[in-house]
Amino acid sequence: MDEPTLTGSLLVATPVLEDPDFRRAVVFVIDDDPGEGTLGVIVNRPMEVAVDEVLENWSGVATEPAVMFSGGPVGTGSGLALGMPGGGHAPPGWRPLDGTPNEESRVDGMGVVDLDAPPEILGGALGRFRVFAGYAGWDAGQLAGEIDEDAWYVVPAVAEDVFSPAPESLWPRVLRRQGGDLALVSTYPDDPTLN
């Protein structure tokens, strides 16, 4: 039997995760392969750089806020884009997420966008589009170890998480949506020493 995949899930940093690269981060898992490792992007770190400053002609396609997002500490000089076709048809230059997304997640229709494809052709076919500078990556077994050490909560994703118009407030909103103990964690102060 295949191991369950984290593809299509969210990794939400627990309050004990103090690494500045991931503190209060919400990571969308793009690909999770037990033998290869895990790749994702931080979806709650908008930058102050407009998409068209980096990728000419893509700004009209970008979901608001139409800025670049800091996707993670790896490969920060390169871009990775996620999108959802507007008409439900798979346009050229778009491919669905690798593997079968987590069954609890609701991210059907989400995929990776080839930024070398002409935006005039591909852009019009996308209903949602977001660009990330860099990504988060874990070697095989590394993320499982961090989850076991209580560094991450693994929760189902919805497309609105990745394309949120208010990404800065995503960390508490995603936790609150889970209910129970995680809803309580959503109220954890940013700096507990000020309490």
Image (tube, helix red, strand yellow):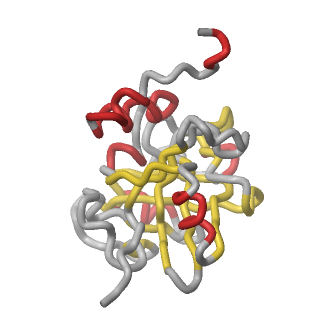
Camera-side residue: 12 or 44?
Answer: 12
**Residue 6 in sight:** yes
> Furthest-front residue in view?
149
* Image location of residue 10, percent across then percent down: 43, 53
Q: Residue at x 36, y 36 (%)?
A: 182
In the picture, measured across the screen, residue 70 lies left or right of residue 64, that is right
Task: Say whether residue 50 is visible.
Answer: no
- Quadrant assignment for the C terminus: top right
- Up the image or down, 59 lies above or below 149; here it is above
Q: Residue at x 42, y 28 (%)?
A: 186
Left or right of 37 on screen, residue 159: left
Within the image, what quadrant is residue 106 found in? bottom left
Could you say where residue 15 lies in the image, as x and y percent from the top left? 56, 35
Name the quadrant of the N terminus: bottom left
Q: In the image shown, does 64 or 47 lie closer to the viewer?
A: 47
Residue placed furthest toward the right:
77
Image point (54%, 19%), residue name: 189
Give the residue at x 62% y 52%.
71
Picture layout, residue 188 above or below residue 38: above
Q: Position of residue 109 (x, y in %)?
A: 29, 65
User: Relative to 13, does residue 74 appear above or below in the rendering?
Assistant: below
